[in-house]
Each structure stands twice: as C-alpha cells, then as structure tokens.
Amino acid sequence: MDLAGAFKVIGTPVRLPGRSDDALVRQIQKQKGFTAPGKPLCPAEGLADGIALRPLEALHWLSYVTRPRYQDDVLDVYLRWGLLRYLGFFAHDYTHSRLPRLTLSEAGRRISGNQRRVTSEEMGIAFGTALAKRWFETTGVADLRAVVDIDVALDARYVFGPSSAVQHIGTQRPDYLLVGADPRDSTRYLVRVLECKGTKNAGHAVPQLARAVGQLDGVTIGGRVPHGLATTVITAENKTSYLAVDPGDDDEPAYEVTAETIDRVRNFRFEADRSDASAAEIAGASVRASWAVLADFGSNLGALRRWAPEVMERRIERRVRERRTFSTPVEEARGTSFTFGFDQEQLTVEYGIARSIDDSLSEGSAGAIMEAQRVFAERLRESPAPDQAGSDTVYSATADGSILSLTLERRR
C-alpha cells in the first residue's frame, strides 16, 4: 500500500461492526470465574450493533491518550506512534454494506508474535476510546473531554495526579478515567471509567470482555464505584469489530469544578494514607491535568508548565518547537507539524489546539478555559460530519480542543 492509499483508508468513513446486547451480557455471565460487578450489567447505549467512524479519529485518540508517557528525546518519534505505526495497517472491504469495513492490509497481516499482541492492545485503546466517545454522546448528558490513564494516576504519581481522588479497592482496576462535561454548564463534570481490551482472535473476545467487566469495580471515586464501560476490539484479518457492555448507573452524580477548585488542587498528589479527598477535588485535579495534556499535544509549553501537576511537570521533558497556525473547517488551530514521505508522496501532520482554547490556556484563567471548551464543543457538535472524500487534507477534532490534521502532497 502506498502513502496515498493509506491516507484514503484512514480518512474514509467505515462501518465498525459490533455488539452490545442482552445475549452478550448472558454470554459474559456464563464465563468461568466471572464475578458480577456491583451494578447490573447492561448493554451500552449507542453501541448495540456497530458505529460509523473514520479510522483517523481512533488514531487521533491513540496518539493523544498515550502521548504523556513518553519523553521528547530519543523516543521523540514515539509521540507520533499512533499515526506512523498504523498508517498502513488497515484496508477496505466493500462487500458487506454501503460503508466499507476495515480489514488488515497486506502489511498488517505480516505483523506477528509479540508485535501483533502490542498492536492488538493499542487498537483496543484507539477504538475503545472512540467507542467511549460515542457512549458519552448517546447518553446526552456530557461531552467526553479527558481520558485519564489510571495506571499513571495511581502507580506513577504522575499526570492526572488526582490519584487521591481515586481510591484503589482491588487488585484489578480499569485502564482509564473518563471525564465528561455538561454541554450546558461549563462547571459541571462527570467522571466514569473505561477498561479496553484488544485481541486478534474472535474466540478470545468474550472471555477477555468478562475480565474487563471484573476490573470496572477496581476503583472508587468519592466513596462510590463510578459508571463504567468495558470494551474489547477484535482486529482479525477479515474485519475489525468490537464487543461492549456497561454496568448501569441510574443515579450518576455530577461534580462542580470552578476556578477556585482548580487553584486549590494545584499541588494535589497521591498520598496512600489520605482518606479525606473529596470527589470534587478528584474531578478538579483531573480537569486541571487534562489541560496540561492538551497543552502538551499542541506544544504550548508555557501552558503545560502552568497547568501540569507538580509530579507531571517533574517527569515530562519537552523541547521548544516552532509553533504555527493552520486552518481547519471547525476552527483555526495552533501547534506543530512534521513531514515525511516516500517516493513521490509526502504527508504533513499537524498537531494543534483550537486557537480560542490555546489562548485561554496561555492566559491562565480556569474559568475562561472551561467556557472556551464549552463553546468549542458546541460548535463541534453542530458542525456537519466531515465529508473529505477526494480532499488532500483530512482532520479530526475532540471536544476539549485537540485537532489532528493530515495533508497529502504528490511531488513532481
């Protein structure tokens, strides 16, 4: 597959088949050693029988969610890993529906051994996070704003430092905290959990999902087990698909986060013997750290230093890079770019932040950031779905203001 072919695959809407129904719930409950969660196990809203998305959106999430783990040194290229590694991983199958399904490309089929295991896990993160976004959208109560790595929060005492707000209550726990914002009130946030798995073998998917469900009870927030989603993504050679379930929560609390809350949690960090951390502190610390991650994505180093928790700032090293402004259909963005090419084709990738939010991050007003993100999320919801067929530029945007743009050029 050449660069133009890979560009077309990731930018074209596809049908991602999947299941989330009562029959799947019964299959999970019959698995050997399955332990029922504390809440009723239910199908996940919005994920009953597949979704439509562009693979670019999943790769955007993968690049964004995994970025803070890596230093800006010898592993610099890993900051673009989600894009570079998987740009030519998929191909299209048009035989089943109006929208194509994703299959593995010839190069993707050649990945084997431990590298194939890593690939499956990372596709579980990429598409699992995209499914979580759709799950949030369907509930209608919040936009997905931040994805918080719980291993980092609990074990590394690093980014998303609100580990005090997350109490470990089991030997197994979910991968991520999901922070959502009320679309009508920029100060109201939800905190949920996500456990996402990945496999290449469809026969392993249900047992794997049963284990994922068992991990959703592994944390409490403010003394309660939060609403959770468990997913597994199957990247088989003939199609990519998913399974998903949701321990229900009919009484989900929202937490108020204000400028005062954000200021109070500036030095919030994990202390194993602390028992007085409130859910509001946890939510505030998560939101603050998510701003640092957003600033990092767009290489706004001043904002990164301003909003990063102390433990995150100590651990992340970044080089100053030239930042530029680039246009997108939803809003002008500011960030960095890099270019790579093969033969007569060249791809330019831009990592940026919506300019209104980038300005607010730099100015240092928590209230201004929350309002700018609310306005941007509303604009994104009202924007028509990208129709970029045949275009030389494609983009993906998240509700918190991160924007990924790709431009293909053919050199003469």
Image (cartoon, rainbow, N blue to C red):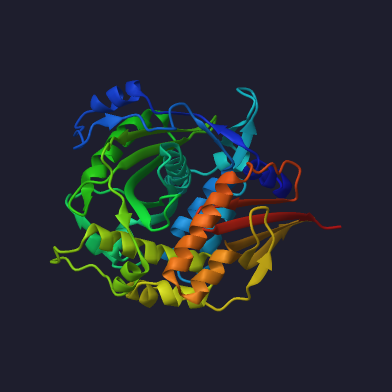
Is residue 339 rendered to the left or right of residue 358?
right
Front residue of 371/207: it is 371
| Above or below, comparing residue 358 to residue 252 in the picture | below
**Residue 46 at least partly seen:** yes
39 versus 3 height, above or below: above
Q: Quadrant of residue 93?
A: top right
226 horizontally vs 376: left or right: left
Q: For this view, does 170 lie left or right of residue 112?
A: left
Quadrant into which the N terminus falls: top right
x, y percentage for residue 332? 65, 62
- For residue 202, above or below residue 176: above
Residue 55 pos. (x, y %): 57, 43
In this view, the residue in front, 291 or 93, is: 291
Nearest to the observer: residue 352 or residue 406: 352
Residue 308 % position (x, y): 39, 72
- Tell me the residue at 43%/67% (across/down): 367
* Image location (x, y in percent) of residue 235: 49, 37
Q: Is residue 299 visible?
A: no
Q: How many marks?
A: 0
Residue at 40 percent of width and 38 percent of height: 139
Q: Is residue 156 above or below residue 207?
A: below
| Residue at image location 63% in from the left, 62% down from the top | 350
Name, please, the residue furthest toward the front: 184
Which residue shows up at 60% across the image and 56% down it? 404
Q: Quadrant of the C terminus?
A: bottom right
